[in-house]
């Protein structure tokens, strides 16, 4: 009976978001309260349970996401993203221009949230298409595959960051594993798959072309790359240094400095100078940029908070342990199970973030009982959360409208690409599990 209640509540969540068009945060709250009451949590305690879950997940995550949004906005506003793109285009040339766009999408995608990266990079894609008279989907899809993979797999993006904290995984190790899995997923779903789309007719809308900053107003190459990649450098460096087994005092210092919140704070303070003050911006202007960035991700924070409420209800009712025991009897590899649950929710709801966070709440007790690698569970659920984007996903419509495609063309290009990313990501995680376990 308890399993039926949980399944019914997840179906209710899906229906509220996809059919009734409820805001995901409101839908999470309704479902969390309903689920708590049906599972027998006393009426005077169910609200406290939801509030505790919201507070717990935001308390550990809000600074990472906010700092990440601020960094991404500054990278865009300062022209650092544009500089990275220009360098990549000059480096790879016309013949390998696709690969240049892939690398650009990957590097820019690490600090930028997906929607910001999409809007920022699409004008670059279109300028290349018009300048060299190349097929738009063939050229553009690989870059967007890179953006999508970083969004689903790599911290400091919201869903993987939340999963890292929820599963008590190591952020640096998850990032290292994530990059290892991301590269083949991007290559196969991007440049290689897009070869089959060379003949897809698409005339991108010129209205989406934007004016670039003059070259003399852009930051330098080294400044742009180091500023955009600083979180990766700091997290990766701390993880590698930890393998050298330093003395305890130094280990404590490294552990403190490698905390994701500290890493993002250090990064933001450094880039405030390198991409802000050093580029002639006043502190007031930089803070206005940061304020706008927080507004852009406010709803993401609320959705994450709502998912924390549902997770806490499942824990407080005791049903999460029952679910874990029941799922364990299915004799399915936990990493595969996490991927399947995330994929089903993604296809139903459309939101990768909602899919990842909901699956994490279900899989948390399974992870404990199965002793699976928490970093790989983050990546498995992240891969599943990208599965088959279609008409209920805003990203689907952004791609369709920007590239001026039919729904059929969008499914054959965008939806298939996202599916390939999800499946290849899962295979990479399972292969990595054989190596590290």
Image (tube, rainbow, N blue to C red):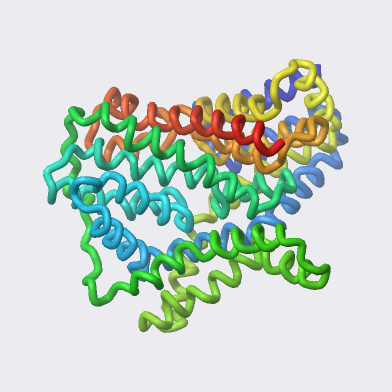
Q: Nearer the viewer, residue 394 or 269?
A: 269
Residue 23 seen in render: no
For image coordinates 44% across by 70% down, the residue present is 289
Quadrant in the rendering for residue 369: top right
For image coordinates 61% across by 30% down, the residue present is 430
85 in relation to 39, above or below: below
For image coordinates 49% across by 65% down, the residue present is 71
Whole-percent x and y of residue 129? 18, 46
Answer with left or right where residue 155 lies relative to residue 99. right
For image coordinates 27% across by 61% down, the residue present is 86
Whole-percent x and y of residue 223? 40, 72
Q: Nearer the viewer, residue 297 or 337?
A: 337
Residue 90 seen in render: yes
Answer with left or right where residue 380 lies relative to residue 20. right
For the image, the number of numbered tags is 0
Q: Nearer the viewer, residue 321 or 179?
A: 179
Q: Nearer the viewer, residue 6 or 237?
A: 237
User: Looking at the figure, which quarter contains the C terminus?
Assistant: top right
């Amino acid at each position: 009976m308890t399993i039926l209640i949980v399944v019914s509540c997840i179906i209710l969540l899906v229906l509220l978001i996809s059919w009734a068009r409820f805001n995901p945060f409101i839908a999470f709250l309704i479902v969390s309260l309903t689920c708590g009451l049906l599972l027998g949590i006393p009426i005077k305690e169910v609200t406290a349970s939801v509030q505790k879950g919201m507070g717990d997940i935001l308390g550990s995550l809000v600074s990472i996401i906010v700092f990440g949004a601020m960094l991404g906005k500054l990278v865009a506003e300062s022209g650092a993203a544009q500089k990275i793109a220009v360098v990549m285009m000059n480096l790879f040339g016309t013949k390998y221009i696709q690969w240049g766009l892939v690398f650009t999408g990957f590097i820019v995608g690490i600090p930028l949230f997906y929607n910001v990266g999409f809007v920022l990079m699409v004008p670059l894609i279109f300028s290349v298409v018009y300048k060299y008279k190349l097929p738009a989907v063939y050229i553009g899809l690989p870059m967007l595959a890179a953006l999508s993979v970083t969004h689903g797999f790599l911290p400091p993006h919201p869903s993987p960051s939340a999963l890292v904290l929820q599963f008590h995984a190591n952020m640096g190790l998850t990032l290292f594993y994530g990059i290892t899995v991301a590269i083949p997923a991007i290559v196969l779903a991007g440049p290689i798959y897009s070869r089959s789309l060379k003949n897809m007719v698409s005339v991108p809308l010129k209205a989406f072309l934007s004016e670039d900053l003059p070259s003399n107003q852009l930051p330098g190459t080294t400044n742009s790359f180091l500023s955009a990649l600083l979180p990766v450098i700091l997290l990766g460096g701390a993880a590698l240094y930890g393998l050298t087994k330093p003395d305890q005092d130094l280990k404590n210092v490294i552990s403190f400095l490698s905390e994701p919140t500290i890493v993002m704070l250090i990064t933001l303070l450094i880039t405030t100078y390198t991409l802000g003050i050093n580029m002639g911006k006043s502190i007031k202007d930089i803070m206005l940029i940061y304020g706008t960035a927080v507004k852009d991700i406010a709803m993401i924070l609320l959705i994450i908070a709502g998912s924390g409420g549902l997770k806490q209800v499942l824990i407080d009712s005791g049903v999460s342990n029952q679910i874990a025991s029941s799922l364990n009897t299915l004799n399915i590899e936990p990493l595969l199970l996490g991927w399947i649950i995330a994929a089903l929710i993604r296809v139903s709801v459309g939101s990768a973030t909602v899919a990842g966070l909901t699956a994490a709440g279900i899989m948390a007790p399974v992870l404990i009982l199965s002793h699976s690698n928490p970093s790989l569970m983050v990546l498995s659920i992240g891969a599943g959360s990208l599965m088959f984007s279609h008409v209920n996903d805003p990203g689907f419509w952004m791609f369709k409208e920007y590239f001026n495609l039919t729904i059929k063309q969008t499914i054959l290009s965008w939806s298939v690409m996202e599916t390939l990313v999800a499946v290849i990501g899962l295979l990479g995680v399972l292969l990595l599990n054989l190596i590290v376990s």
